[in-house]
Image: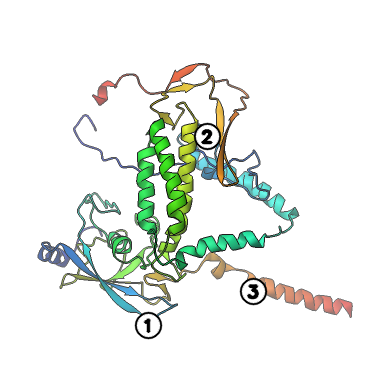
Amino acid sequence: MCNEGIALEAGLMAHFNLGGIKMNEKCETNIRGLYAAGECTGGTLGANRMSGTALSECLVHGAISGKYAGEYAQKAQAAEIDAKQLENIRDRVFQPLKRKEGVQPIEYTKRIRELAARTVSPVRNGSDLEKGIEDVERMKTKESPMLYTEAKDTIYNLEWIEAIQAVNLLQMLEILLRSGLYRTETRGGHYRMDYPMTNNDDWLKNVIVKRVGKEMQLTAHPVVITRIKPPAGKLPWPAPRHMPDWLK
Amino acid sequence: MASTPSYARLVEVRHMSRKTIKVKVFRFNPAKDKEPTYKTYEVPKLSHDEAQAKVSIMGEHRAQTILDVLEYIYQNLDHTLSYYATCRRGECRACGVLVNGKAILSCLAKASVRVDAKGEMTIEPLPNIQVVKDLIVKRYSDRELFSNARTRALNLLKESYKQARSVE
């Protein structure tokens, strides 16, 4: 079709999430009784998923996690709830309704999205990621606590939902920025202009982000290799070296 | 289905020069209001590139949809508006609203066509269903419709009768 001069329109959309909640082969997370399955988890499909594996991942994880969650549920006791923690969460969630003025959630979400487009787009570099982290820190401490809504009722309040989600969106962006900066190489979906080679000597590792107190702690763990060992050394990102004839 | 009816083309031509559409939206908050009201907004006509809910039906060009109108009102004019839309491509059938008396899917219906003779638009929730808030109607979940709570309650009652008889 390109040869006939007919243009194809292409648009951006969110298609798949690489990386996510850490789990073991029973789909257990580090919180007892919480199981994770499907696209929200990380590690099954490596650095870049192959076509056709997304739905299969959901089905396979769904079956495994359902089975082990069921087994756990039959023996589990109801856990004790910390009343203080519950009160803190309740205050935090209802604060936008009580506040009279501050930051508008819809406009705040737009700014978070613009920041994400500037810093964690498919092609990244270290200086953009560092600047992004500074911006995110400032937004987290100064603007997230100041979100407020115009409508003060709790029935289908879309603005309130956005106010709650904006805080989580910012946290996700912070995780993306920090782990992108931490990994000083290019691998799969993570392409860095300042480190364009895939480094199989130093970086056959998973980056794990954990919350310790109020900070994020990043660690790198070597991957367990069972059957096929990847080639050693620094390799270029797998892209054609020259433009093919039909694209010229 | 996808082609515009002839009267709508006439309306479109007559109001082509206007830059905004006058939209009357049904508002009802059961926590505060005793009766529903209508609020009027002036929504600008978005061009091909600015239409947020990008829609291409049967090869027709993208155009501003009713969902674009509602999103414009929510994001720029009145943050208290409540509306519902999920897939935004006509598959889930969740975004149904009543526009000028006709039930349509807001993600597919074009705003330039859905104006009445005066060039105005009235958006209301689907009729004959309980209104939860503004344009959102009550949708029953599977749990509410197909629960076996009644059967389980009756079984418990039967068992308690059996136990009472076996003790005697």
Residue at image point 54% right, 65% down: B142
Secondary structure at badge 3 equals helix
Circle nearer the viewer, 2 or 3 = 2
Does the image show residue B144?
yes
In this view, A42 is above or below A223 = below
Does the image show residue A15?
no
Q: Which amino acid type is shown beneath numbered disc 1?
A: Glu
Residue at image point 14% right, 67% down: B11
Instruction: For marks 2 and 3, give the CA distance.
Output: 45 Å
Q: Quadrant of residue A226?
A: top right
Secondary structure at badge 2 equals loop
Instruction: For marks 1 and 2, give the CA distance.
Output: 54 Å
The residue that disc 2 covers is: A45
Residue A233: numbered disc: none
- Observer-nearest residue: B4 or A200? A200
Where is residue B55? Give x, y as percent: 28, 52
Q: Are marks 1 and 2 in contact (CB under 8 Å)?
A: no
Compared across the picture, whether B145 is left or right of A238 comes to right
Q: Are marks 3 and 1 on the same chain?
A: yes
Give the chain letter at badge 3: B
Circle nearer the viewer, 3 or 1 = 1
Q: Which amino acid type is shown beneath numbered disc 2?
A: Leu
Compared across the picture, whether B82 is left or right of B69 comes to right
Instruction: For marks 3 and 1, give the CA distance.
Output: 35 Å
- Observer-nearest residue: B34 or A113? A113
Residue B150: numbered disc: 3
Q: Which amino acid type is shown beneath numbered disc 3?
A: Arg
